[in-house]
Every structure is written in structure tokens, then in C-alpha cells.
Image (tube, helix red, strand yellow):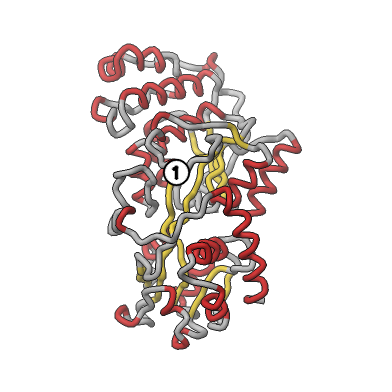
Amino acid sequence: MKHTPPGPRSPGNGLSRRRLLAVGTLSAVLGPSLLSACATVGEFGEPSIGAGDIDPLGGRAAVDEMAELYRAAADEGESEIVVYGPVEDDRAPVYRTFEETFPGITVRTEVLQGPSLTARVNLEVASGRRAADLIQTGDTTMVALAETGRFQPNRPVTAAGLPDSVIDGEERFLGVSALPFVIAFNHDIVPADEAPRGWQELIDPRWRSMLVWDNPTAAGSALTTITHLLHDGRQDEAWLTAMAEQRLGLTPSAAGVSSAMATGEYPVAVSYPYGFYLSASAKGAPLTAVFPVDGGSHLSTHFLGLLDGAPHPRAARLLTAWLFSPRGQAALAEVGQYSLLPGAPPPDGLPPLDEIDRLAHLPADQAERYSRDTLQLTQRLFR
């Protein structure tokens, strides 16, 4: 479940072991300001930034910022960045692209979500043995961590165009991507022209004992989807009651939904992360996705926050700046995640974000209260 497990900071990253850059070509491409920022990077190598990369990285000011952060990370021997979140496996190709641009820095991830993520962060703070630099997850967990003072402000130049609706008021966390959720089905069992297309179709009795979802009575993607559905208002408690009567197969996490569909045990997934669909399909699972979803599509905003006291703050700020650049956002689109920056291209094969009938926006500072109320409801209905 890990891209690369977090490891201890190497004592051998100091300046004494560095070799100087061959900076001639870098000077010609980036100019004196960037050259001065990168010339002392040493063993970290030369950033892979050419003349044609300036705009894809967000423009001159953004590249200046990244180059300065790269130099600072090198000066401090910050050779890794540790990221915790629920879908970090999906983002492994994104981080590889970053690592190719900024040699010497490795992104290490661990898949954690909800209470387990919060508990890990709090344990690291209490013990003084901090490993994580960045948290990348949904609104409820981010707000809970922010309210206990876990983040420091972090808004790079590349995030200048981000809508206010996905920015924490104190800039402690920023919306970095939106993860689409689809209805998915095993097309070897369910004909495409008969598959459910929306929320109301899913409660049709014909789908009884054929639906699978991750357990909505605990923190996870099902609970988040239901919270946003009820807040949107087009589906209500009566709809959720009907869904609970469908005799769903419930799995401990969204990852378990894939195998239940692929084997045909439960051939239809109620609300399934698009990234999981891409991964399962690439491995040969006979799945088809329905998106957009009739009655409002759920896209889960994932936020990025820099932990206060992070062990690799300069490198983490560099990754943040790169993720919000056009190149970083394009890399996220390649793994099925939408950019929240206006005008950014959608994931391949999906409609532009502004053409989707989305569930009503739930402000991040209200998410925890809505989620808590929804949890009480799901625990009563799905017991």
C-alpha cells in the first residue's frame, strides 16, 4: 500500500559531500536569478527545467520560487518528502514526474485516512518523532487537524488562481484536486444499456443484493458521499433508507469494492473512486464507469496542508508549488483527478469540470458537523 515507506533522514546529505553543478546550460535557459538560486545545489543535481518548461511550471515567478526552494532544500539536506493520505498509491506516477524534475528529492507516502491518519499525526507530535511533512486528504480530516494547530500557512505562487471556496481562511490548507466518484459495474454481468445511471436508479428493487459499497458506518468514501448527497438536498433520508434496504455488500474500505465487482459477487458499485476504477481496469477487471451521475456527481475535494514542525519544510513547499503548476495539475489529471484551477484540462475521457452537474458545495468548515450528523444516521440505518 506504499509508494516508498518513510525512512530516517540520512546523515550523509550534508554540503561536505556535494559536488558543484555544471551550470552553463542552466544559466543560458533560466537566466541569472535562477542560476544564483540553483548554483549551490550540489549532489541534488541540476533541475530538469528548460526554456520550454517555464510556462508549464507556471511562469517566471513560479520557477523562481521553485528554484529557490530547491536550493534551500539542498542546503538543508532535505532529500525526502513524506506525504500521508488515503489515495497516495494513485498519485505515485505524479510524484515520479516531480522527482524527475528535481533530482535528489524522493517523495515517500503512506496510505492513511480518517481517524487513523489523525491519530498518526497526533502521535508523532506527542512523541517528538515527526515523519510526515504533508497531509493530502478530504475536508473533515483537514479541518479537524487544522483546529488543533497542526498546519502552517503554505500558499505558493502557482495557487494564485485557486477559488476562495477551496482555500482555508488562514491558508493552512488548499484544495489541490477533486476526485470523481463513479457508478461502476461489471460489464460481463450487467449489460451497459441496463446499468444504473443515477442515484434514483440505484434504489430500484432490481438491484437488491447486487450493490457494493465501502462501509458507510465509519469514516471513508461512502460516508463522505452520503454527507454530500444529503447536504445537496436532491436525495434525502427516505432515499438513504431505501438504499439501506437494498441488502448491499459492505466492505471495510473502497479498495475492497474492486474485488467484489471483479468476481461478480456484487457487480455494481454505488459510488466508486475513479482512480480505483482506472487501476482495476488496467489490471484487466471487466469494469465500466458511469460518469457524470444523474442527480448530481460527487467530486471529493482533496486538500493539501503543510504540517507545523514538518522535518522537510522546504522540500515540501517545493512539492506544493509544483503540484499547483500546470504540469503538476496535468500529472494529477493523468491519474484521474480534476484540477480546481480555472481552465485546467480534465482527466482524459471526462467532461470539463464546469460542465458537470456537481453536488452542492459543502464548505470545509461545516464538513465535520455534517459528517457527524450523517454518521449517526448511517449507523442507525445500516446496522
Whether residue 281 appears in this view of the structure is yes
Is 310 left or right of 301, judged from the image as shown? right
The percent coordinates of residue 343 (x first, y second) are 29, 44
The residue that disc 1 covers is 176
Say which residue appears at 33% left-offset and 38% top-offset.
Answer: 327
Say which residue appears at 35% left-offset and 13% top-offset.
Answer: 33
Between 281 and 314, the one nearer to me in the picture: 314
Q: Quadrant of residue 308?
A: top right
The percent coordinates of residue 170 (x first, y second) are 56, 35
Q: Secondary structure at mark 1?
A: strand
Between 280 and 157, the one nearer to me in the picture: 157
> Is residue 77 placed above or below 209 in the rendered structure?
above
Q: Quadrant of residue 169?
A: top right
Is 225 left or right of 278, judged from the image as shown? right
Say which residue appears at 46% left-offset and 29% top-offset.
Answer: 104
> Is residue 103 placed above or below 24 in the rendered structure?
below
